[in-house]
Image (cartoon, grey):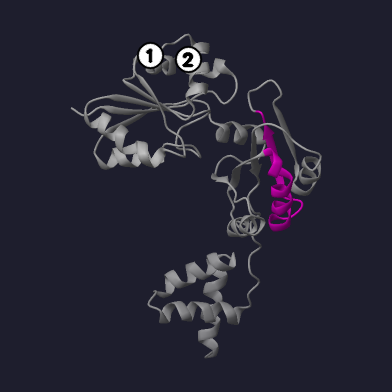
Amino acid sequence: MTGTLVLAGTPIGDIADAPPRLAEELAGADVVAAEDTRRLRRLTQALGVTPKGRVVSYFEGNESARTPELVEELLGGARVLLVTDAGMPSVSDPGYRLVAAAVEKDIRVTAVPGPSAVLTALALSGLPVDRFCFEGFLPRKAGERLSRLKEVAAERRTLVYFEAPHRLDDTLAAMAEVFGADRRAAVCRELTKTYEEVRRGPLAELAEWAAEGVRGEITVVVEGAPEAAPEELDAAELVRRVRAREEAGERRKEAIAAVAVEAGLPKRVVFDAVVAAKRSGD
């Protein structure tokens, strides 16, 4: 039988947040793959656990080379535990390559859920949480960063980013330029740690604050784009759009409904415009 790959979430700050199953998995896994073996040692000491299995490093620099080795272990029946420095493996951390390789070989993959900086920051931000998207780290180069931000300038969902403290002021300034100075945001610093701080406000204001210098691990949450105002279309344009859709193969009923959605109008308004045009011979 093949083994099992276990992705385990680790505390993002407070060690007391470690799930009970994490200690069990650390103690019982045949192989523990850790992003930083020194941090793993501190974690196991804090939890009072001694791994019985082999401990190996698994980080960005050796991820490609070590993945085949771990897959072989899994194919041989081993239980492989993957942990990163903080939070959930594969979420802006090593892990995706190993999960994809395991899935391709039909190896069972499971998880020990744990703390997440993304969800913690989102919950604390005070911004809408019903729909959101995680964008990870932005590019370091200014031009590439602006291009990436412009790609999501019209995104309606709340946006979540990770950022290094020494780049935070530049990132917030770029966000203010692309998203608008008044777009609401929250900078979450050192979550669950002693000096936890959540700074909320307009992007321009936050950029000015960050220019003074910020330390610690940073998660930025940004309000989604406001709903665009409906187009103001006259009756002739409504009729033109309906006819264009009909010529493309849509039935009139569906064409009217689609144009009504585009224009942000009741279907009856579009229907009346089409009927009036037909009566007048336009």
Disc 2 residue type? Thr
Q: Are marks 1 and 2 in contact (CB under 8 Å)?
A: no
Residue assigned mark 2: 44
Q: Residue at x 71, y 53 (%)?
A: 174
Residue assigned mark 1: 27
Is residue 102 positioned above or below 253 on the image?
above
* Rendering coords of residue 31 (x, y %): 34, 23
Residue 180 falls inside the magenta stretch: yes
Disc 1 residue type? Ala
Q: Sequence-wise, which precedes: disc 1 or disc 2?
A: 1
Q: Residue at x 22, y 26 (%)?
A: 77
Of residues 16 and 26, the one drawn nearer to the viewer in this rendering: 26
Span shown in magenta: 165-190
Residue 140 falls inside the magenta stretch: no
Of residues 274 and 174, the one drawn nearer to the viewer in this rendering: 174
Residue 197 falls left or right of residue 269:
right
Q: Secondary structure at mark 2?
A: helix
Residue 102 falls left or right of residue 218:
left
